[in-house]
Amino acid sequence: ADAATGEFTATATLHQTVAPTQPEAYGMFIAGSGLDSNPDYMYFIIRGDGKFMVRHRAANGELHTIVDWTENAAVRKQNAEGQASNTLAVEGGPWGVRFKVNGTQVGEWLKRDIPYLNAAGQVGLRVNHNLDVHVSTFTVARAPAMIGSRPSGPNSPRNSTVPSSMAGCTTSANISCS
């Protein structure tokens, strides 16, 4: 896996191609550690009804809901055929994280406000079961010029197919935010 330090931006463009039989989600995870044994990570997911959610899964099994399912106009809803394309971005660093959908910021959390918040670790894709989602881009890059050490406030490459049987993608990168 690739390694980086400091602030980063992870971006993925995901295409849902078929309507699921029930609301299912897909998106990105960050701050991954212990993924093979005691997983600890934060995930940012969307679904075809135009909603997003942010959660943290702790290594001890606790699940912290940071934002429960919330409708947001930035999340493109699936059409009559069940298709939707969305670009997700996570900007992170030692200060905290910022989440965007199709260029619109939908949330920002500071490390000082959420004690378990950590942006350092593996970054990857998360796809629930019963979905056909294609990934047209997935990048993780250091971004010191793009993200300042101060948060902006509330206003402020590969082609692959993720099979519906996958609960997550193995493509990831290590990020260290110190």
Image (tube, helix red, strand yellow):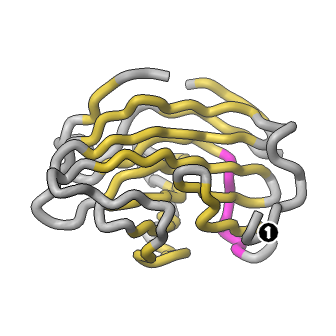
Q: Secondary structure at mark 1?
A: loop
Q: Position of residue 75 (x, y in %)?
A: 44, 60
Q: Amino acid at mark 1?
A: Gly
Depicted 137 relative to depicted 99: above or below: above
**Residue shown at 21%/36% (left/top)?**
163
**Residue shown at 60%/40% (left/top)?**
10
Query: Is 69 in the magenta?
Result: no
Q: Position of residue 64 (x, y in %)?
A: 50, 75
Q: How many marks?
A: 1
Q: Which residue is at the front of the view, 69 or 65? A: 69
- Furthest-left residue in this view: 21
- Furthest-front residue in this view: 80
**Magenta-drawn segment:** 114-120
Depicted 98 relative to depicted 113: above or below: above
Horizontal side of residue 29 vs 110, given as left or right: left
Q: Position of residue 54 (x, y in %)?
A: 50, 67
Residue 128 visible within the image? yes
Q: Residue 153, located in which quarter of the rendered image?
A: bottom right
Q: Residue 23, located in which quarter of the rendered image?
A: bottom left
Depicted 74 relative to depicted 34: above or below: below
Residue 130 visible within the image? no
Instruction: Find disc 1 in the rendering and name its residue.
Output: 153
Q: Which residue is at the front of the view, 140 or 136? A: 136
Quadrant the C terminus occupies: top right
**Residue shown at 67%/28% (left/top)?**
3
- Tell me which secondary structure the magenta stretch mostly adopts: loop
**Residue shown at 81%/72% (left/top)?**
112
Q: Which residue is at the front of the view, 77 or 29? A: 77
Horizontal side of residue 70 vs 90, given as left or right: left
Q: Residues within 10 Å of mark 1 (few under 14, many from 20)?
A: few
Horizontal side of residue 45 vs 150, given as left or right: left
Quadrant the N terminus occupies: top right
